[in-house]
Amino acid sequence: MQQIFLLTLVTLFLKVSMAQSSSGNQAPAIEIVGNKFFYSNNGSQFYIQGIAYQADTANLTGGQTINDPLADFETCSRDVPYLRELNTNTLRVYAVNTSLDHSRCMDLLQRNGIYVIADLSEPGLSINRDDPEWTLKLYERYTSVVDVLAGYSNVLGFFAGNEVTNNASNTDASPFVKAALRDTKAYIKEKGYRKIPVGYSSNDDEQTRIAIANYFACGDEDEKADFFGINMYEWCGTSSFRTSGYSDRTQEFSNLSIPLFFSEYGCNEIRPRRFTEVRTLYGSDMTDVWSGGIVYMYFEEANEYGLVEVDGDSVITNDDFDNLKSMMASISPTIRNSASYTPTSTSLSCPATNQYWSAATGLPPKPNNAICDCIQSSFACVVNSNVDKADFAPLFDYLCANIDCSGIAANGTTGEYGDLSFCESEVKLSYLLNEYYKQNGRSSSACDFSNSASLASATSTPSSCSGVLASATSESRRGGSASGSSSSRAAGVNLAPSSSPIVTLFTTVIAFLITGLNMLLL
Ligand SMILES: *[C@@H]1O[C@H](CO)[C@@H](O)[C@H](O)[C@H]1NC(C)=O
Ligand SMILES: *[C@@H]1O[C@H](CO)[C@@H](O)[C@H](O)[C@H]1NC(C)=O
Ligand SMILES: *[C@@H]1O[C@H](CO)[C@@H](O)[C@H](O)[C@H]1NC(C)=O
Ligand SMILES: *[C@@H]1O[C@H](CO)[C@@H](O)[C@H](O)[C@H]1NC(C)=O
Ligand SMILES: *[C@@H]1O[C@H](CO)[C@@H](O)[C@H](O)[C@H]1NC(C)=O
Ligand SMILES: *[C@@H]1O[C@H](CO)[C@@H](O)[C@H](O)[C@H]1NC(C)=O
């Protein structure tokens, strides 16, 4: 009886696994060799035939700010037949809601051989080019997206940023994006997930486009981008490889050592769009250097880039759709095999700084929650919890005009990053208030700021903090030497010299702990 039951179980197991393998995974993981993508199952080259797929947030209700296209089975199942008509094998989604379930859409896409490339940020949590930071909150956002998508073989990759640096005036934002990329790659490794590639999506700015590609593609394996996308709108109406600018771009990026593709394309200055660029993009002029592209976009909206109009269950295709469909049906790009492919370019040096490019190669440190918590619990003077974040600015301005703010500052031009630069603004502000208080004789009037600050009731630094702060010091020093930066000062610079206020603070905390311990022992 038991044996029969066991046999049944074994048979059932075999049937299930055979069913799975005979139905097959239509979207086996994609791997990168040199500057190309390949199917991992058979080594066949993979070109992105993509569509940007995310409706705007206009009709959302209930305080939602993300319209997650992978969380609504009604709509993704409605749209897959149309995506297939266009020979789509990749969707770009710009923001996912990590609270929602993506399994039904992801499985449906997988069965249809469609991959997803997802931005890690969302509008409310992204690196701001005008005030760049790589913070705990952002790290948590990025890694939570990785967590919800890592299990699907049809995740092609992640974008650590989209058009963050967009011209010569804000190239100092790029080190923060590269730090995000580095830490996301490390997280994927740490969690034992599949080696999902992480890259960047750039705009097409004349003065910065070459430098930014080289910047993301250069450096150590654990901090460089795995692929590079450029949002490309140079081919409008009927154009050609030479007149469109595609020829020049192909020449300029010919040495890029990682896969390169259009992370958006499809100029709409002349409609209907004829999509004649498709033949060129997947033709012999470009396929040595490029790996395809992503048409912007599926949904027809106010900006008039759509291929279809949707209304409930109904999908109405337009002329752009028909034109793209016939163009996609006509391509036959050269398919290499990874087994017989030898990359021509494997490494690249980082771009020189000049009038248009001034991003340090030294990157901001990895956000570390424990450091912020530990240091915060040691402050004698802190910001009051009822002070609105919008009112922090004048306090920061005043404090930084009076005391050294390097511990909280982060400068992507010089590559100098304070050891608390990744903490939330409350922690940073309390750090400064506490410094100010100490430097002004610890008088209670030095911890007031019109009722914005007050003395902390009792400092109770957890005993785990001594280890955290000590390892932070050594980690930061290691980061400094490993950054490979020659022109810029590296991460952790404020921990090294003994004059640093934070080192003093760390020492104070450690001394406090030791004293506390001695008192207990007595
Ligand atoms: C390799 O596998 C992929 C995914 O199953 C498939 O789409 C492709 O046609 C295969 N390539 C070849 C040359 O068999
Ligand atoms: C929002 O709803 C209006 C009215 O139903 C509709 O016309 C419009 O297309 C919708 N917009 C989006 C982006 O779905
Ligand atoms: C994500 O989805 C949850 C559940 O529907 C919702 O409460 C939340 O507002 C959504 N988040 C965003 C940022 O839209
Ligand atoms: C650079 O981009 C910023 C942000 O989009 C914009 O405000 C600024 O005008 C641009 N500068 C130049 C020189 O294009
Ligand atoms: C590509 O590399 C070759 C060999 O190092 C070099 O001669 C050429 O100038 C490079 N091209 C570009 C566009 O950087
Ligand atoms: C970074 O440092 C440079 C050189 O000291 C300075 O000109 C620039 O304003 C600083 N940037 C920020 C964001 O503080």
Image: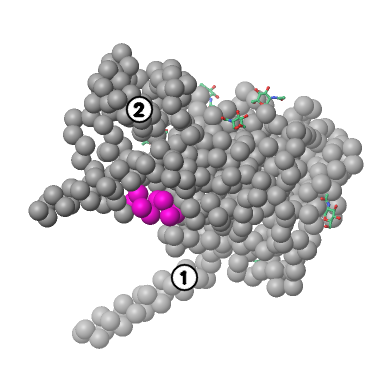
Kindly tell me whether mark 1's CB lies below 8 Å from ligand 1.
no
In the displayed structure, 272 sits above or below 402; it is below
Residue extending farthest to the top is 450
Residue located 29% across and 51% down the image: 466
Locate residue 126, reporting x and y percent. Answer: 51, 35
Q: Residues within 10 Å of mark 1 (few under 14, many from 20)?
A: few
Mark number, residue 19: 1
The part of the chain drawn in magenta is: 468-475
**Numbered badge on residue 439:** 2
Q: Amino acid at mark 1?
A: Ala
Whether residue 461 is visible to the viewer of this picture, yes or no, is: yes
Earlier sequence position, callout 1 versus callout 2: 1
The CA span between labels 1 and 2 is: 72 Å
**Quarter of image, ligand 5:** bottom right
Secondary structure beneath disc 1? helix
Where is residue 227? Give x, y as percent: 65, 52
Magenta stretch: residue 334 in it?
no
Residue in the image at 58% along x and 31% along y: 129
* Of the pair 191 and 338, the residue shown nearer to us: 191
Q: Amino acid at mark 2?
A: Gln
Q: Residues within 10 Å of mark 2 (few under 14, many from 20)?
A: few
Left or right position of 478 against 455: right
Q: Position of residue 20 (x, y in %)?
A: 47, 68
Q: Where residue 201 appears, x then y in whole percent?
A: 64, 42
